[in-house]
């Protein structure tokens, strides 16, 4: 499957150019995932809440790790703020549905991608940005599927708004990587990480999660 991030679905000045197209070389089990997610929407919403909090944490962690990187800090501040807004919005929906916040066992996806981040700089920075970009791209795709199939117009509208944000975040992380590393290095590494990302989704996780 190919996830295309051209002019479509992306907003704002940080939209990546056509060259940022991501090609996921292996197709994850989308239909099985949609079926599982729609049948367990409350649990998926709860996992979504955790995802938004973790996304804010990713941006904040990078801010702590690279405190002297001025241009990056500005973009990360905006992402962290937006993710926390999403976190609050998802929590309001959970409250309205009578679902209490609780810990959830994560799917292996996040840890699997984190394991791909090389430990030495500057590779660590590049990989961290690209792993964050891929997670945002996949969130964009999954939110789109939920918007289309959830069967609830107001929830669908909410998913569509968030879907656009996550595409922008993908673009922002890609731009940050491209500012510090040559374009061909970024794209080559992105392709390699995208293969791993798709493999991590090949087998549907037993528990319904946003990224499983
Ligand atoms: Fe978000
Ligand atoms: Fe995001």
Image (tube, helix red, strand yellow):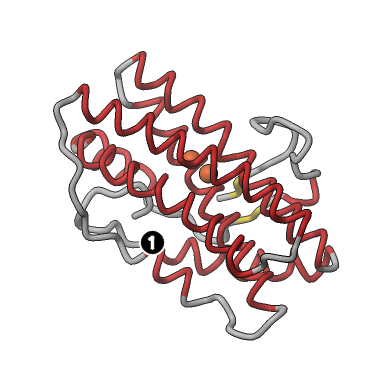
Left or right of residue 39, residue 137 in this image: right
Q: Residue furthest bottom?
A: 120
Q: Secondary structure at mark 1?
A: loop
122, above or below 89, in the image: below
| Residue drawn at x 69%, y 81% as measured from the top left | 121
| Residue drawn at x 51%, y 60% as measured from the top left | 26
Q: Quadrant of the C terminus?
A: bottom left
Q: Which residue lies under the disc numbered 1? A: 202
Of residue 123 and residue 190, the one placed in the foreground of this image is: 123
**Residue 89: where, in percent of width, then height?**
38, 29
**Residue 140: where, in percent of width, then height?**
52, 40
| Residue drawn at x 26%, y 38% as measured from the top left | 35
Cβ at disc 1 under 8 Å from ligand 2: no
**Residue 106: where, in percent of width, then height?**
28, 60
Left or right of residue 78, residue 55 in this image: left
Left or right of residue 104, residue 29 in this image: right
| Residue drawn at x 63%, y 50% as measured from the top left | 76
Of residue 105 and residue 57, the one placed in the foreground of this image is: 57
Q: Quadrant of residue 111?
A: bottom left
């Amino acid at each position: 499957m190919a996830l295309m991030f051209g002019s479509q679905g992306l907003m704002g000045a940080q939209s990546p150019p056509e060259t940022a197209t991501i090609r996921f070389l292996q197709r994850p089990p989308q239909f099985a995932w949609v079926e599982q997610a729609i049948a367990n929407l409350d649990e998926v919403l709860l996992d979504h809440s955790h995802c938004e909090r973790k996304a804010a944490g990713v941006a904040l962690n990078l801010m702590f790790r690279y405190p002297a990187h001025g241009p990056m800090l500005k973009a990360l501040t905006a992402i962290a703020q937006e993710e926390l807004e999403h976190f609050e919005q998802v929590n309001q929906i959970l409250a309205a549905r009578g679902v209490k916040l609780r810990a959830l066992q994560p799917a292996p996806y996040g840890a699997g991608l984190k394991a791909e981040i090389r430990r030495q700089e500057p590779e660590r920075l590049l990989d961290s940005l690209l792993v964050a970009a891929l997670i945002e791209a996949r969130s964009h795709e999954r939110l789109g599927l939920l918007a289309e199939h959830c069967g609830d117009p107001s929830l669908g509208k909410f998913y569509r708004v968030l879907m656009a944000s996550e595409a922008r975040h993908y673009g922002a992380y890609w731009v940050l990587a491209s500012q510090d590393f040559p374009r061909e290095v970024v794209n080559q590494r992105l392709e390699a990480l995208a293969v791993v990302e798709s493999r991590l989704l090949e087998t549907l996780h037993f528990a319904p999660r946003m990224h499983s």
